Image (cartoon, helix red, strand yellow):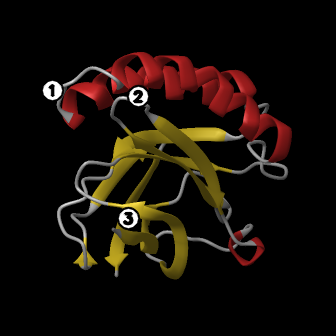
Amino acid sequence: MSRLFLKEFRALAATESSSDSPYFVVLVGHPGSSPTMSCINIRREAWDGEVDSGDLITANMAVADNVDSSTLVLAALMEEDDGPDLVGADLQKVIEFVRPTFAAFGSIQGMSLSALADKVRPEFRKAINQYSTNDDLIGVKRVQVTTSAGNLPLVNYAGDSGAYRVRFTMQN
């Protein structure tokens, strides 16, 4: 299995009249007879109020180990307004909110990752909206793990008057 990285992202249109402060909340789930999942917050303070339309940000930040084509990866793009909301105890609450749904559907033998994503994504979105106080959710997208080494397909986000293109990559 390989390691998933957030490689880079481009702000096609910033959400604010001033600079954006984007961050990511990534759900990584391993379906099977005993499904497991986790969530991680991916951000850098250097991005706070520094991302403008057209900017390409090179992140190269590790997201998760033991990722392969049978792993469900959902990435939420957030725009921080006054400190990141989904960290620490609030991030743990998101995990606890989504875990029962992932466990129920992630243990169904033969369920495709696409179908699993369709079941888990709405709960992930609900949890983010419930535990985020003032940050804006740009969107929740599935990251398709198509290779064990190299770039994954681009993920496009548009919402809350912002648009971003995001690249994840895999490394052995």
Say whether residue 65 is visible: yes
Tell me whether the residue at label 3 lies in contact with that at label 1, contact meaning CB atoms closer than 8 angstroms.
Answer: no
Q: Circle 3 sits in a helix, a strand or a loop, which is it? A: strand
Please identify the quarter of the rendering in which residue 121 is found: top left
- Across and down, in percent, residue 83 comes to 84, 53
Residue at x-position 74% and y-position 36%: 92
Mark 2 = which residue?
A: 121
Three-letter amino acid code of the residue under disc 1? Gly
The residue under label 3 is which amino acid type? Val
Residue 35 location, quadrant: top left
How far apart marks 3 and 2 lie (CA) works out to 18 Å
- The quadrant in which the C terminus is found is bottom left
Marker count (numbered): 3
Near mark 2 (Cα within 10 A), the count class, few <14, some 14-19 or many ≥20, is: many
Q: Residue at x 23, y 36 (%)?
A: 113
Mark 3 and mark 2 lie on one chain; the one further toward the N terminus is 2
Q: Residue 110 shows which numbered tag?
A: 1
Vertical arrangement, residue 113 with respect to residue 123, above or below: below
Verify CB contact (< 8 Å) between mark 2 and mark 1.
no
Residue placed most toward the observer, 167 or 96: 96
Residue marked by disc 3: 166
- Residues 130 and 99: in front is 99
- Residue at 45 percent across and 72 percent down: it is 5
Picture coordinates of residue 126 (x, y %)?
56, 20
Label 2 residue SS: helix
* Residue drawn at x 32%, y 52% as measured from the top left: 143
- N-terminal label among 2 and 1: 1
Is residue 164 toward the left or the right of residue 14 in the image?
A: left
